[in-house]
Amino acid sequence: WYGVLFVRQGFYQGGVFRFTVSLPENFPDGGCP
């Protein structure tokens, strides 16, 4: 999954932060990393 955060207020105002969420094939049945 991919996501983007647009910050409107605060120290990072105007910032655009892109991120990726990676889940293992056996999620949620696998152990903790």
Image (tube, helix red, strand yellow):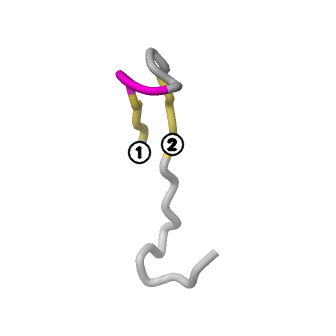
Q: Secondary structure at mark 1?
A: loop
Q: Are marks 2 and 1 in contact (CB under 8 Å)?
A: yes
**How many neighbours does mark 1 have within 10 angstroms: few (below 14), some (14-19), or many (20 or more)?**
few
Amino acid type, mark 1:
Trp
- Quick one: 6 or 21, which is closer to the camera? 6
Q: CA distance from mark 2 to mark 1?
A: 6 Å
- Quick one: 19 or 27, which is closer to the camera? 19
Residue under label 2: 20
Q: Main secondary structure of the magenta part?
A: loop
- From this view, report whether residue 12 is shown above or below residue 28: above
* x, y percent for residue 11: 52, 25
Of the 4 image quadrants, the one containing the N terminus is top left
Residue under label 1: 1
Sequence-first tag of 2 and 1: 1
* x, y percent for residue 7: 40, 25
Say left or right for 32 vs 3. right
Q: Residue furthest front?
A: 10
Q: Residue at x 49, y 61 (%)?
A: 23
Q: Residue furthest right?
A: 33
- Count of marks, rendered view: 2
Amino acid type, mark 2:
Thr
Q: Which residues are magenta?
A: 6-10
Per the image, is 8 magenta?
A: yes
Q: Residue at x 44, y 27 (%)?
A: 10
